[in-house]
């Protein structure tokens, strides 16, 4: 029996356009656009709600006349009184304007379901509109306060998609529909069976990402390392990372996502010493798709993504990470690629979302 063709509306952010401006890294946007393209290729209709200037393959863009906060709409952030908490309210209301428009159109013309990425912005509206099926993708850890709020706004028309099983641990009894791992386009991340003599770190330069620990491990192992990610001029950067930069530890700054494969495929390993319960780390799958093993701390989704001693090593601290660097010869780069093909491709992700949507609509 042929699958039903769905009419779906989706929304990620009103703050900036899709694709995002140069220098902006926002993984939920990458995931959303790849899901949209995949669903459209399977015959489903998708309306994408985003500010003026948004372009998404496979979707009809509905901007609702909204100017992105990165462009003309940014002037509101500079008016007197738009500071601190008031500024945060502006960002929230910018998203909620698009979400409200989605719900109004759903009631007037009918969508089979809405797919919303910024769950916090949509909860009150979805609770008030229980005739509209709403699916959320959870991109962040579920802290205790968030679990309480999700429970407070829970209703039968709202369902959650987790991006790893570890993400559910703090709140296992919410209305989960399924776990769908984030996927990547395999053809954008070219495989290499050989590598150059450097380690790699890719991501935001923040304490929770463990950049300083990656540097420490590379120094202990006496290895070269490349750091990719925009550098903030703050105490963490200036005290924990900048002093080590030189011929062996190199910072490249921002690199567009679609250019990252050039660095992944020649790296000896990706270091992923996260300091928090990260729900999913796309950089792990991107690296492994190129054949590059991952050495990560045993936190968050790392044990679900990395096959220990087969596609990398799962360790508990910097000393173990430095030791694991010396064992990389035991890892098959072809096994790394195969694991992503079988578990973390865009095709697998789209298949997962399609099943969730068809079952819930």
Image (cartoon, grey):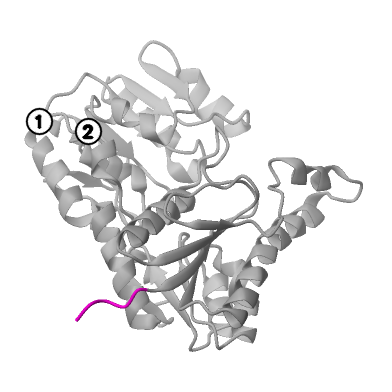
Q: Are marks 1 and 2 in contact (CB under 8 Å)?
A: no
Secondary element type, mark 1: helix
Q: Is residue 121 above or below residue 207?
A: below
- Residue at 73 percent across and 62 percent down: it is 93
Left or right, 13 with respect to 43, comes to right
Instruction: Name the disc covering residue 97, or none.
Output: none
Question: Which of label 1 and label 2 is nearer to you?
Answer: 2
Mark 2 highlights which residue? Answer: 190
Residue 179's image quarter? bottom left
**What's drawn in magenta, residue-wise?**
1-5
User: Which secondary structure class fits the magenta region best?
Assistant: loop
Q: Is residue 159 above or below residue 277?
A: below
- Residue at 39 percent across and 46 percent down: it is 274
Residue 352 among those drawn in magenta: no
Task: Locate residue 212, reporting x and y percent.
Answer: 44, 33
Q: Quadrant of the N terminus?
A: bottom left
Q: Is residue 296 above or below residue 276?
A: above
- Residue at 20 percent across and 56 percent down: it is 343
- Which of 259/18 is in front? 18
Left or right, 15 with respect to 291, comes to right
Instruction: Name the disc covering residue 329, or none.
Output: 1
Quick one: label 2, few (<14), some, or many (20+) residues within 10 Å? some
Q: Looking at the image, is mark 1 or mark 2 earlier in the sequence?
A: 2
Q: Is residue 178 above or below residue 236?
A: below
- Which of 224/18 is in front? 18
Task: Locate residue 143, reporting x and y percent.
Answer: 51, 67
Quick one: label 1, few (<14), some, or many (20+) residues within 10 Å? few
Residue 49's image quarter? bottom right
- In this view of the protein, can residue 294 be seen by the observer? no
Secondary element type, mark 2: loop
């Amino acid at each position: 029996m042929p699958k039903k063709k769905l009419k779906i509306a989706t929304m990620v952010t009103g703050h900036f356009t899709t694709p995002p401006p140069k220098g902006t890294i926002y993984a939920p946007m990458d995931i959303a656009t790849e899901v949209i393209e995949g669903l459209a290729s399977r015959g489903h209709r998708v309306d994408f709600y985003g500010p003026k200037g948004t372009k998404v393959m496979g979707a009809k863009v509905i901007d609702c006349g909204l100017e992105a906060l990165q462009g003309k709409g940014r002037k509101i952030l500079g008016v007197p009184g738009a500071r601190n908490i008031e500024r945060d309210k502006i960002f929230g209301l910018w998203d909620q304007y698009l979400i409200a428009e989605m719900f109004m159109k759903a009631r007037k013309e009918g969508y089979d379901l809405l797919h919303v990425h910024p769950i916090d912005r949509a909860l009150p509206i979805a609770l008030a509109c229980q005739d509209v099926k709403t699916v959320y993708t959870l991109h962040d850890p579920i802290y205790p306060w968030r679990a309480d709020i999700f429970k407070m706004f829970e209703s039968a028309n709202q369902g959650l998609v987790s991006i790893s099983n570890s993400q559910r641990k703090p709140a296992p009894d919410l209305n989960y529909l399924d776990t769908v791992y984030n996927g990547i386009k395999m053809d954008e991340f070219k495989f290499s069976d050989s590598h150059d003599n450097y380690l790699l770190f890719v991501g935001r330069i923040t304490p929770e990402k463990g950049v300083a620990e990656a540097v420490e491990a590379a120094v202990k192992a006496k290895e070269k390392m490349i750091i990719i990610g925009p550098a903030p001029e703050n105490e963490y950067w200036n005290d924990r990372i900048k002093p080590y930069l030189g011929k062996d530890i190199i910072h490249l700054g921002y690199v567009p996502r679609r250019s990252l494969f050039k660095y992944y495929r020649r790296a000896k390993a990706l270091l992923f010493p996260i300091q928090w319960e990260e729900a999913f780390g796309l950089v792990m799958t991107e690296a492994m798709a190129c054949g590059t093993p991952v050495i990560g701390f045993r936190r968050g989704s790392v044990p679900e993504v990395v096959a220990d001693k087969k596609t990398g090593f799962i360790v508990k601290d910097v000393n173990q990470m430095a030791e694991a660097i010396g064992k990389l010869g035991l890892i098959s780069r072809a096994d790394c690629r195969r694991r992503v093909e079988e578990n973390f491709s865009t095709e697998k992700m789209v298949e997962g979302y399609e099943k969730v949507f068809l079952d819930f609509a």
